[in-house]
Image (spheres, rainbow, N blue to C red):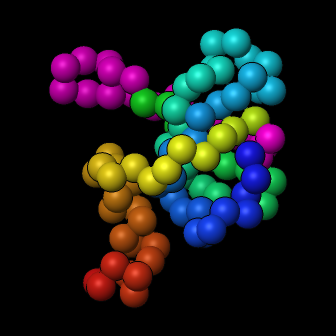
Amino acid sequence: MNPELSRSLVVGDVFQINEKDGRKGWIGAFVLATRIEGWGIVGFVAHVATRDQQHHAYIRLPWDHVDYIGHAPLLPADLAQRINDSNPEQHGN
């Protein structure tokens, strides 16, 4: 993944784990970024626990193990609240 995109990468961006990762169970999974770092991303893969609840499997990945997909139009409420709390001027709060 080339982190030099035409836009800045932000929390809430979606990445797909590529074959360079080596953990076959993770390859192809979509990761929602919770942190963007110089070395790569920290994020989670969401999976359904029950009809009304999801679980998150967290993972850290270097840039060469992911491909940028886009920004998630809908974020889990807890992540959206953390983003708003950390960037009030960006969100008009």
Residue 25 image position (x, y, % from top left): 63, 13
Residue 74 shows in the view: yes
Residue 67 image position (x, y, % from top left): 66, 41
Q: Nearer the viewer, residue 26 or 59?
A: 26
Q: Residue at x 39, y 87 (%)?
A: 89
When asked about the image quadrant of residue 64, the answer is top right
Residue 43 shows in the view: no
Answer with left or right where residue 65 lies relative to residue 77.
Answer: right
Was residue 76 drawn as part of the magenta stretch in this picture?
no
Q: In the rendered image of this protein, does residue 75 appear above or below residue 55?
A: below
Start and end of the magenta stretch?
47-64
Was residue 59 drawn as part of the magenta stretch in this picture?
yes
Quadrant the C terminus occupies? bottom left
When asked about the image quadrant of residue 46, the answer is top left
Q: In the rendered image of this protein, does residue 46 appear above or below residue 49?
A: below
Q: Residue at x 59, y 62 (%)?
A: 9
